[in-house]
Image (tube, rainbow, N blue to C red):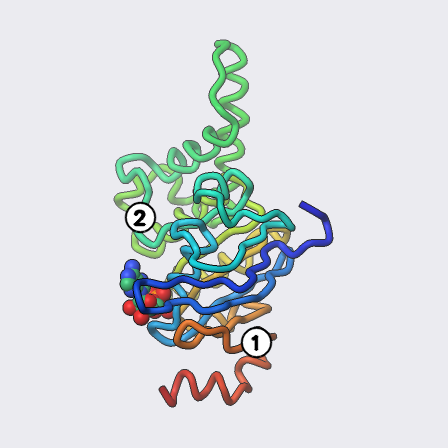
Amino acid sequence: GSSGAPALRLHGLGKDFGSLSAVKDVSFDVAPGARHAVIGPNGAGKSTLFALVAGALPATAGTVMLHGDDVTKLSEHARARRGLVRTFQHSSLFLSATARENILIAVQRRHGVQGQPWRAVTRRRALLAEADEVLEQLMLQDRSGATAGSLSHGERRQLEVAVALATRPSVLLLDEPAAGMSPADTMAFQELVLGLPAEVTVLLVEHDLDLVFGVADRVTVLHLGEHLLTGDPDEVRASDAVQHAYLGA
Ligand code: ADP
Ligand code: MG
């Protein structure tokens, strides 16, 4: 990829389900380091767009560029290896493993496992240190030894982000993280997103507008599968078209 390229460029992206166009001709850029949110009323196409970007669904039309490289034809796994990493809306954690172990698994996957006994010991220390760093970044150090299954809903969401972050993504995709969260959990999650490393680009698909306007520096609005507007939060809030999409539908 080229250094001046956007972190993500979506161009003419479309997805049909039979006769229904869930996403129609959507184009926008996500700048490196952005906290970019995609919003829209129910049925707007947010989840479908997220799946197209992550590679979970094949696009009917258009392209997805990652740092200037066309990844449209790549699988979700291949995109993840290039640094485009999603968290899962439905938990993908090992529930009987501790928070620290869940992160360690992701760290180990990134480094690969090595054979020689002494090297394995020193390596393990480095991997544990890296896992602990991620635990701290995500404000989970107090829950380090707790099994994922014993965490609260909000803590699990935190851990899911931690596991994704442990893979050192360049672009982190967050799929409706506030879904099912209490207001207190949502506020804690907002702090977490604000505390993510500045160099990680974040693309957030989210229904909760308080969370979106609390974290996003750029917002894209979808309505009935179409791109309505991409702009700064103030611009989006002031838009008549956006008000109409939410209230006048
Ligand atoms: P949002 O996440 O913004 O609520 P979705 O992307 O889930 O919107 O859905 C957009 C439209 O596509 C909706 O009309 C929905 O019913 C339809 N849709 C989503 N997924 C499928 C699917 N797998 N098969 C058929 N229709 C789908
Ligand atoms: Mg959705």
**Quarter holding the N terminus?**
top right
Q: Residues within 10 Å of mark 2 (few under 14, many from 20)?
A: few
Q: At 45% from the left edge and 45% from the top edge, which residue is drawn? A: 162
Q: Amino acid at mark 1?
A: Pro
Counting from the top left corner in percent of width and height, residue 211 is at 45, 69
Q: Is residue 113 above or below residue 145?
A: above
User: Where 225 sits versus 160, above or below?
Assistant: below
Disc on res. 233: 1
Measure how far apart labels 1 and 2 are at the Cα level.
30 Å
Q: Which residue is mark 2?
A: 91
Q: Residue at x 51, y 70 (%)?
A: 214
Label 1 Cα crowd, 10 Å radius (few <14 / some 14-19 / many 20+):
many
Instruction: Name above or below for residue 59 compared with residue 159.
Output: below
Q: Residue at x 49, y 17 (%)?
A: 114
Quarter of the picture holding the C terminus: bottom left
On screen, residue 68 versus residue 153, left or right, reads right
Residue 94 left/right relative to 235: left
For label 1, being within 8 Å of ligand 1 is answered: no
Residue sticking out furthest to the front: 19
* Pick the front one: 37 or 183: 37
